Image (cartoon, rainbow, N blue to C red):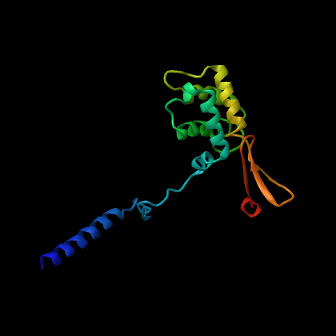
Amino acid sequence: MRVRSAVVCGIALVALVALAGCTSAGDGQADPPAGAPPTAGPFEDFQQRPGVASFVEVFRTTFPDLADGRSDEAIASDVTHVCLDDLRDPSTGQPAPDGEAAALRHIPSRFERNGITPDTVTARMILSFAKGTACGPVHVVEDSSSTAHLSSSTAHLVAGAGAAA
């Protein structure tokens, strides 16, 4: 009898814990289940571009003192801000008329590390690397074999033609 009571109590406890996890945001929508993958927004999607990874690699190689102790994700986040918030108008996504000037104003504070702040020459180099990698356009070029090549200025991916459509 004691074993049966313990099992019933255990099942009741599991049910209570499961119900406690089912909360609502108060807007009539249930929260996503625990462990569900978060939905990515435009910022997160942009960070997955091959050019962003290329920028991180170039940045680490060229500016080891500024990269020291920083995660790839932190560097990717900073260059994504340069691309999406400085060089482009965040409300329209179109190139900002003063985008380069805005980027050059923000780069020193974004990329400062360990008491080292990028000077004007370093900020211009970072901007140049960003424009050539992370912020560069991705072009889809089909060759004669009907294979689509997605490319930025330094990174190349090959995907089937159906995947590019």
Residue 97 seen in the current view: yes
Q: Position of residue 132 (x, y in %)?
A: 72, 36
Give the quadrant of residue 6: bottom left
Residue 103: image location, x then y, percent:
64, 30
> In the image as oriented, which residue stretches furthest toward the left?
1
Viewer-closest of 39 and 10 = 10
Residue 72 image point, x, y percent: 55, 39
User: Looking at the image, how many numbered discs can be counted on the residues?
Assistant: 0
The residue at the point 53 percent across, 56 percent down is 39
Q: Is residue 103 above or below residue 18?
A: above
Picture quadrant where residue 80 is located: top right
Residue lying at 64% horizontally and 25% vertically, measured from the top left: 123
> At x 63% / y 42%, what residue is drawn?
53
Q: Residue furthest bottom?
A: 1
Residue 81 occupies quadrant: top right
Question: What residue occupies the far right of the structure in this picture?
Answer: 144
Q: Nearer the viewer, residue 6 or 99?
A: 6
Residue at 53% from the left image edge and 38% from the top image edge: 74
Q: Is residue 28 left or right of residue 82?
A: left
The answer to whether residue 102 is visible is: no
Which percent across, then down, holds residue 37? 49, 58
Q: Quadrant of the N terminus?
A: bottom left
Left or right of 149 on screen, residue 23: left
Q: Quadrant of the C terminus?
A: bottom right
